[in-house]
Image (cartoon, rainbow, N blue to C red):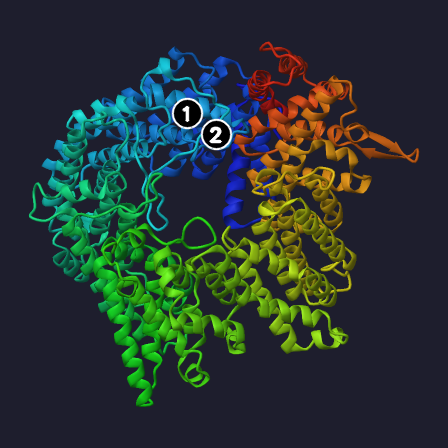
């Protein structure tokens, strides 16, 4: 439509404008939208459409047409950046800036925002090539606007542009430009070090300059929007992820090729809390200038002035001011001089004194909210407490209020939380109310205060006054949860919040409850024991009077959930951990049977013992209650503490439970996860026995009955007939779940017995795998048990034991492969095919995990002797395993995220650590690895792509170093061979050199992949210099524009020759090549992707 531009061709420009306007109208009216979209796309894809776009912006009366013209300027400029002159680039940016300033009073806000965004993006695109004077010229225009000398509307527009600019330079909100991450990182560093603080001061001055006008006016004035947008910009800047906070430019020596991770002290899962760490250079502007006082006074004065207007709390200026105050509460780091605790404390005291009126007194504020007042101020007050809690210790947090109140901040927090809990109890609704939100924020505050921090892993302790207040709060929480359980006892709606929360979502709240309880453990554990015994007595009373026990049972279920999370932490592994508070408290309780945790645990065990009686179990114990009695939190808390477990394993009730586990078939009614949990807990309790031999014998006594059953079953002459009976399948499944639970509880103390358990059923497992080949659920349980057992044992086994285990694993893999279990038949319906694919995915993931566990023997080995390489080679075995399972893994199956991650993790490890084994692969296995690596390079998960790139780097580096040393390296697998005279077998290195170049130059990818891609591309080029030269020649010849052809040839030459790059694969050359590739992509990627 538009191939050339003639400045004097007014008719042509008007025709273009009318065409775009018509296309926009057609889309709005849903008239032939496909053709209309094609018209708009042609504008963006036209070579240098800038004059036409400017004409549309200046002449059109259709707002959407202007929006499309601005978007076309952005698309074309970024695409053609490499061929635009410096004058053209500056002209486009200046045009956009002048346009938004000249039309600052326009009612077309979204058009203004788009053009402002385009100006910001183009300024960023040229940021690294513009000299300082050019940048200053652009920013001078903005500063002039922000001073207000051109009117309020222009002032607002100038600040709004800075919002767009800061957003573009922030990695989390920047617009994709098809450039490497390193480009964005360099822009971010430049803005942070040289300009960000200046922008903040401009916004600060603009807001302060209009404050008096706002305060003196009885109605809303235009200056309000200037103040609001200034506060918003200041908040945006404080939300910046500061990385270069030293303030000394000379000392900044950043490797932009390394990935930086933000380490906030607390990661909350319900409420957003961003830690602000700008560095010492910000101290003057944020702390010493009286800025915080000004902000608090501004909000306080406005709050008082508009106190009778309830809606004011939700006005933009009020919301922005409160958000900025909350953000100041999370200010931390070296902006506070080391050792100057007074400055930090003064800052926080000042803020707390300002926000206390938002949240105190809690009962009064709660009543006004229930009467119709907005809750936004209270919720922001809660967020402010959360922010303060993330940057202080419990002691300092508590002291902040004591300079102005007779109580500490923790007492206020308890009172506020108590009021919220009371409101929740009073309303009792499934709808999410303000009290729900407040509760979650305040629970996050408790988590921030009390969660283990630092390397010590210990929980934070509270001052004495805070302990008492936390104890009272926990009692109220327990009362609230029991009341909720009672109120919903007869609710059959599966979507009921309490039922869902008790199974899934409530875990987060329970973890916080556990922290509060452990902070006041001398109150909470006796309270839980008292309440539990009370409910137990009520249950006996209800049973004796033959009344409905549902309500009491629901309360007991809720109580057991809470107790489980008090006695055990989630931890980072599969097994919940006993908290330090329980391990270190009550040290004066010398007699075991008087230990408060033992008393609580004994009460629960006596209750669980009742379930052994069939009559009581049938009439009283619901499946949910039985599952909670065997939940991993509860039992892990009971057996995890050494002193407590010593006492527990001596109790008659514990021995009866263990006996029932071995002999009572009624416990098979438990769910699979609770079968595992019960077995795991009982095996772990062996740590409470006096020595290793006793512990191992205890485990044998627990598990021998189950292994014997499997041995007997697998040895039956009529096994095929018996094994397929439903009852047999149920029993086998339960026993496998128990074996899996026992295997997961393996510890050095009981490793011997667990290993014997697994060895004793090796042959049975193979027999059952053969028998149940058409029962996918059983097959999966067999595989998962083997994975769990191997994972726990492999590091401890001696050479001969390892050989036995490896032989077993190979037989298992071969047997699975021979049955081709999970194969999807084309005759299946789509539903059956999907089900079969899911089953196959689960099986293959388990097999991959098995191979990964075998790999760990090379990394972690606790055996006393060395593994003789002549007896066994782990790498060889794993590659044999890969040979066996790779034919079963299709590209469709790799679309399952977990299987995909596990597969590429194993493949990356093997190719990085044992690249020499690739030369031993057969043709089919090599082809499969090539196909899967190619799939992985274009995966959506950047971690998968990184693993593939690391694998390619390892293979290419190995091959290059080997051929330099005179060896064959990967041999024919590197470059490929002719097979049977006609078919060409593609080589792994010759395949991925062009593939990687294609990805980097023409495809979309995450900007943080360029460094890893460079590390793979460099050795690939060294391995195939002839192929690389041919690819370069083809790429150059495809360019029809002589200018492009010359620039591309020069860039390709510089890629491999500049920056003192040599052909040695070492760290310095890898770094040089990364730098070369960055410059190369910035230079050519834009015009190579031009349509």
**Disc 2 residue crowd, few under 14, some 14–19, many 20+, Cα 10 Å:** few
Q: Position of residue 111 (x, y in %)?
A: 41, 35
9 horizontally vs 992: left or right: left
The residue identified by callout 2 is 259
Nearest the viewer among 368 and 922 is 922
Task: Count numbered badges in the picture.
Answer: 2
CB of mark 1 within 8 Å of CB of mark 2?
no
Dividing the picture into quadrants, the one containing residue 293 is top left
Q: Can residue 1039 be seen?
A: no
The residue identified by callout 1 is 188
Q: Can residue 623 be seen?
A: yes
264 horizontally vs 837: left or right: left
Q: CA distance from mark 1 to mark 2?
A: 14 Å
Dividing the picture into quadrants, the one containing residue 752 is bottom right
Q: Position of residue 242 (x, y in %)?
A: 35, 29
Residue drawn 15% across and 61% down?
A: 367
Residue drawn 17% across and 32% down?
A: 292
The secondary structure type at the circle numbered 1 is helix
Q: Position of residue 454 (x, y in %)?
A: 34, 39
Nearest the viewer among 127 and 445 is 445
486 horizontally vs 1083: left or right: left
Examine the rendered structure and indicate whether residue 357 appears above or below residue 875.
below
Sequence-earlier tag: 1 or 2: 1
Which quarter shows the N terminus? Answer: top right
Examine the rendered structure and indicate whether residue 561 appears above or below residue 1053.
below
Examine the rendered structure and indicate whether residue 985 appears above or below residue 137.
below
């Amino acid at each position: 439509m538009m191939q050339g531009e003639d400045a004097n061709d007014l008719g042509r420009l008007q025709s273009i404008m009318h065409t775009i306007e018509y296309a926009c109208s057609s889309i709005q009216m849903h008239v032939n939208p496909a053709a209309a979209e094609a018209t708009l796309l042609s504008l963006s894809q036209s070579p240098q459409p800038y004059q036409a776009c400017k004409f549309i912006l200046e002449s059109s009366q259709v707002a959407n047409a202007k929006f499309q013209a601005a978007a076309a300027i952005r698309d074309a400029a970024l695409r053609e950046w490499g061929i635009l002159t410096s004058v053209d680039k500056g002209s486009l940016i200046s045009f956009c800036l002048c346009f938004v300033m000249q039309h600052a009073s326009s009612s077309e806000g979204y058009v203004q925002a788009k053009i402002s965004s385009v100006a910001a993006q183009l300024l960023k695109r040229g940021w690294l090539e513009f000299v300082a004077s050019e940048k200053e010229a652009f920013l001078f225009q903005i500063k002039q606007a922000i001073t207000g000398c051109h009117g309020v509307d222009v002032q607002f527009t100038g600040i709004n542009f800075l919002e767009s600019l800061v957003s573009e330079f922030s990695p989390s909100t920047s617009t994709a430009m098809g450039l490497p991450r390193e480009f964005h990182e360099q822009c971010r560093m430049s803005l942070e070090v040289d300009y960000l603080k200046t922008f903040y001061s401009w916004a600060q001055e603009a807001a302060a300059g209009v404050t008096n006008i706002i305060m003196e006016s009885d109605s809303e004035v235009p200056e309000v929007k200037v103040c609001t947008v200034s506060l918003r910009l200041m908040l945006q800047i404080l939300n910046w992820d500061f990385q270069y906070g030293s303030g000394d430019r000379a000392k900044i020596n950043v490797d932009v090729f390394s990935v930086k991770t933000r380490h906030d002290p607390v990661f909350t899962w319900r409420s957003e809390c961003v830690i602000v760490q700008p560095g010492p250079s910000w101290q003057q502007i944020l702390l010493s200038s009286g800025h915080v006082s000004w902000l608090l006074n501004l909000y306080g004065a406005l709050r008082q002035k508009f106190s009778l207007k309830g809606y004011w709390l939700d006005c933009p200026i009020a919301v922005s001011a409160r958000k900025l105050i909350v953000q100041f509460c999370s200010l931390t780091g070296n902006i506070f001089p080391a050792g100057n605790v007074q400055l930090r404390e003064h800052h926080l005291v000042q803020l707390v004194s300002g926000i206390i009126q938002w949240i105190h007194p809690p009962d009064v504020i709660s009543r006004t909210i229930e009467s119709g007042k907005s809750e936004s101020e209270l919720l922001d007050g809660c967020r402010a407490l959360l922010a303060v809690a993330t940057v202080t210790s419990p002691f300092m947090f508590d002291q902040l209020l004591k300079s102005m109140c007779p109580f500490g901040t923790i007492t206020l927090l308890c009172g506020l939380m108590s009021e919220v809990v009371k409101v929740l109890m009073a309303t009792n609704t499934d709808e999410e109310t303000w009290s729900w939100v407040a509760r979650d924020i305040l629970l996050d505050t408790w988590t921030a205060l009390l969660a283990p921090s630092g390397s010590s892993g210990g929980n934070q302790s509270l001052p004495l006054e805070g302990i008492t207040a936390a104890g009272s709060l926990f009692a109220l929480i327990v009362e609230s949860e029991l009341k909720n359980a009672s109120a919903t006892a007869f609710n059959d709606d599966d979507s009921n919040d309490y039922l869902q929360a008790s199974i899934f979502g409530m875990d987060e709240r329970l973890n916080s409850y556990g922290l509060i309880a452990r902070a006041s453990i001398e109150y909470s554990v006796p309270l839980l024991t008292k309440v539990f015994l009370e409910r137990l007595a009520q249950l006996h009373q209800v049973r004796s009077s033959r009344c409905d026990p549902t309500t009491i049972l629901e309360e007991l279920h809720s109580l057991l959930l809470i107790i489980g999370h008090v006695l055990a932490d989630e931890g980072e592994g599969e097994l919940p951990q006993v908290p330090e508070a329980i391990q270190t408290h009550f040290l004066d309780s010398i007699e075991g049977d008087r230990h408060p945790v033992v008393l609580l645990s004994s009460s629960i065990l006596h209750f669980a013992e009742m379930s052994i009686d069939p009559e009581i179990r049938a009439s009283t114990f619901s499946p949910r209650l039985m599952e909670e009695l065997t939940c991993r939190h509860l039992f892990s808390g009971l057996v995890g503490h050494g002193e407590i477990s010593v006492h527990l394993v001596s109790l008659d009730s514990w021995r009866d439970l263990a006996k029932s586990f071995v002999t009572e078939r009624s416990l098979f009614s438990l769910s699979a996860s609770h079968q595992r949990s019960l077995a795991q807990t009982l095996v772990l309790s062996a740590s409470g026995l006096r020595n290793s031999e006793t512990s191992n014998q205890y485990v044998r006594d627990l598990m021998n009955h189950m292994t014997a059953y499997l041995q007997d079953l697998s040895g039956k002459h009529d096994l095929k007939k018996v094994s397929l009976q439903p009852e047999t399948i149920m029993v086998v499944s339960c026993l496998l779940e128990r074996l899996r639970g026992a295997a997961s509880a393996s510890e050095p103390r009981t490793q011997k017995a667990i290993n014997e358990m697994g060895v004793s059923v090796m042959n049975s497992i193979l027999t059952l795998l053969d028998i149940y080949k058409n029962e996918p659920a059983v097959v999966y349980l067999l595989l998962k048990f083997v994975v769990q057992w191997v994972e726990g044992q492999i590091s401890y086994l001696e050479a001969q034991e390892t050989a036995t285990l490896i032989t077993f694993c190979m037989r298992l893999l071969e047997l699975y492969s021979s049955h081709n279990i999970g194969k999807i038949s084309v005759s299946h319906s789509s539903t059956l095919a999907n089900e079969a694919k899911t089953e196959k995915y689960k099986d293959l993931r388990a097999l991959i995990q098995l191979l990964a566990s075998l790999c760990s023997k090379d990394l972690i080995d606790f055996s006393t002797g060395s593994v003789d390489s002549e007896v066994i080679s782990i790498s060889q075995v794993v590659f044999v395993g890969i040979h066996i399972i790779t034919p079963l893994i299709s590209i469709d199956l790799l679309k399952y995220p977990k299987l995909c991650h596990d597969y590429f993790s194993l493949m990356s490890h093997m190719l990085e650590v044992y690249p020499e084994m690739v030369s031993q692969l057969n043709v089919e296995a090599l082809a499969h690895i090539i196909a899967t690596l190619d799939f992985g390079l274009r995966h959506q998960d950047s971690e998968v792509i990184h693993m593939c790139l690391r694998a390619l780097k390892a293979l290419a580096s190995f091959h290059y170093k080997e051929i330099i040393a005179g060896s064959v390296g990967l041999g024919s697998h590197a470059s490929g061979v002719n097979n049977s005279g006609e078919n060409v077998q593609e080589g792994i290195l010759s395949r991925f050199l062009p593939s990687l170049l294609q990805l980097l130059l023409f495809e979309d990818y995450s900007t943080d992949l360029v460094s890893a891609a460079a590390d793979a591309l460099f050795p690939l080029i060294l391995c195939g210099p002839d192929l690389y030269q041919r690819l370069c020649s083809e790429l150059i010849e495809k360019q029809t524009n002589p200018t492009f052809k010359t620039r591309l040839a020069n860039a390709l030459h510089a890629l491999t020759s500049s920056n003192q790059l040599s052909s040695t694969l070492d760290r310095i050359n890898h770094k040089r090549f990364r730098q070369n590739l960055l410059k190369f992509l910035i230079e050519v990627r834009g015009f190579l992707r031009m349509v």
